[in-house]
Amino acid sequence: MYTYIQPALHIDGEWITNTSGGTLEVRNPADETRLGDLPLVGAAELDRALDAAQRGFKIWKATSAWDRCQTLRRVAQLVRERHERLAELMTLDQGKPIQESRMEAKAAADHIEWYAEEARRGYGRVIPARLPSVRQTVVREPVGPVAAFTPWNFPINQAVRKIAGALAAGCSIIIKAPEESPASCIELVRCFVDAGIPNGVLNLVFGRPAEVSSHLISSPVIRKVSFTGSVPVGKQLGALSAQHMKRTTMELGGHAPFIVFADADIQAAATVAVALKHRNAGQVCAAPSRFYVHADVHDAFAAAFRERASRLVVGCGWEISTQMGPLTKGARVAAMESLVADAVAHGATVGLGGTRLRDKGHFFAPTMLIDVSPEARVSYEEPFGPIAPLYRFDTYAQAIERSNALEFGLAAYVFTLSHKTAVDCAADLESGMVSINHFGLALPETPFGGVKDSGHGSEGGTEGLEAYLTTKFVSELGA
Ligand code: NAD
């Protein structure tokens, strides 16, 4: 079994284990054993972090893009070297299978490298002037110190996109990482520190989320807020940010439609559906969670899904055979039970699973629900767990209308062998991302983000740097 770390905060270049905010017990979601005590910030440490971020910003903004790039490359190298340890820590407190943790840790290095390169591409432009003696230029500048809030489902991936994006642009950052699964994020920050990031540029805190966010967002030091989490919290933080005129990136929840047309390769669709649905036990904002299947192929798809999902090995993340681990938060098991009971009360049939597993740990079975009513809660509440509700449709228009019916708009999946249907879906789906005949989302070089209630702004792609830059226009007479 892996060993845990002594959890700590990082403020102004110093690792801190004694704080004024008390401590919180961190537990292993697979066996519920205590892993350690997490120090929580109080107002005094938050003020220290703000002060450090302000000083750090001055230093980092004045560091050339070339040097920022070189530092970030060193971080990526350290993350690669340490990925096994990062993965072990993530499996211990977040619960995902070790193979998934390794992939996430290695992918973090790819994200950092992408942003290292993008750091050198914060291009401005020259606009032809109306007078020959005027020179008009547009320059991009780092927006300022950033406050970032990241959730427990991808402790490294969610944090690294914000940290690397902000640092590439020349911003300093205070990140409040997840209290439920802090260790891998702490070790990720250690990679940045060991690679030579100046004091104050990257500060890591844990605390009572609402206290930390209201303290940081209302501070005049913070110029940008980036949040990943649920829609209700995103709306609260968005309102607070607007009150203080802070720019925001909001990566909020999703309820992704997965449309299987009659001409689809059903076996391929089922393979992708089962892999995506059960990755990280379904605790993925872009996970498919409404399966619209054409009536002609519905039963064949359901059988193929059941056959694959019933073979999944559910267990502790550190056992190498495990394909799906526990839910991170104990309360989510009761939430799964409640969603299933409600769907059944609305007429659904349980085609697979539907129950919690084991006496210890937060395990829930891979679950397929058939003929789910649109009135059932699971049809409009993000399940954020291993529940796959299936719905039949007859026409293209029905599939699109039902897919677009919710206020969510993060990811959508389409399976069809018709190029016309694929192109039409890409245009008609109200979604920030559409993946057709495969899973092709969340790469460092591609934008990741939603529309409607799923938020605004993108991480990854060239948009990822854009999020941390402002535009300055300079007009000079006599040039
Ligand atoms: P939650 O709404 O209580 O918290 C979601 C995240 O936001 C957590 O990391 C939490 O620490 C943080 N948070 C909560 N209140 C905050 C505040 N006032 N200021 C700053 N941060 C705050 O939900 P939960 O029980 O942790 O998770 C359940 C739901 O959250 C899921 O059903 C899912 O919809 C959503 N979620 C989405 C993502 C995502 O990647 N978009 C990640 C985690 C959770």
Image (cartoon, helix red, strand yellow):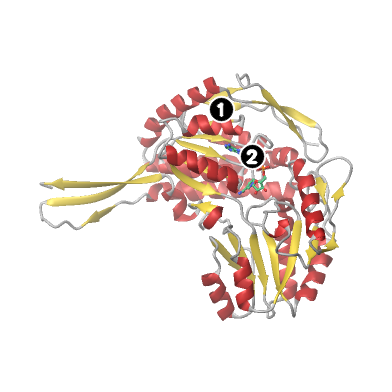
Distance, label 1 to label 2, CA atoms, is 19 Å
Q: Residue at x 55, y 62 (%)?
A: 431
For ligand 1, tell me if the residue under mark 2 lies within 8 Å.
no
Q: Residue 240, image x and y in percent?
A: 48, 38
The amino acid on which the numbered mark 1 sits, given as a three-letter code, is His
* Nearest to the observer: residue 5 or residue 299: 299
Instruction: Tell me if 126 is positioned left or right of 123 in this view.
Output: left
Examine the image and state in which quarter residue 7 appears.
top right
- What residue does disc 1 label? 10
Q: Nearer the viewer, mark 1 or mark 2?
A: 1
- What residue does disc 2 label? 82
Q: Is residue 167 visible?
A: no
Q: Residue 263, image x and y in percent?
A: 68, 80
Against 420, residue 406 (above or below) is above
Q: Residue at x 45, y 35 (%)?
A: 172
Examine the image and state in which quarter residue 261 appears.
bottom right
**If you read the primary sequence from the N terminus, does the residue marked by circle 1 or circle 2 appear first?**
1
Q: Is residue 337 visible?
A: yes
Instruction: Tell me if 198 is positioned left or right of 136 in this view.
Output: right
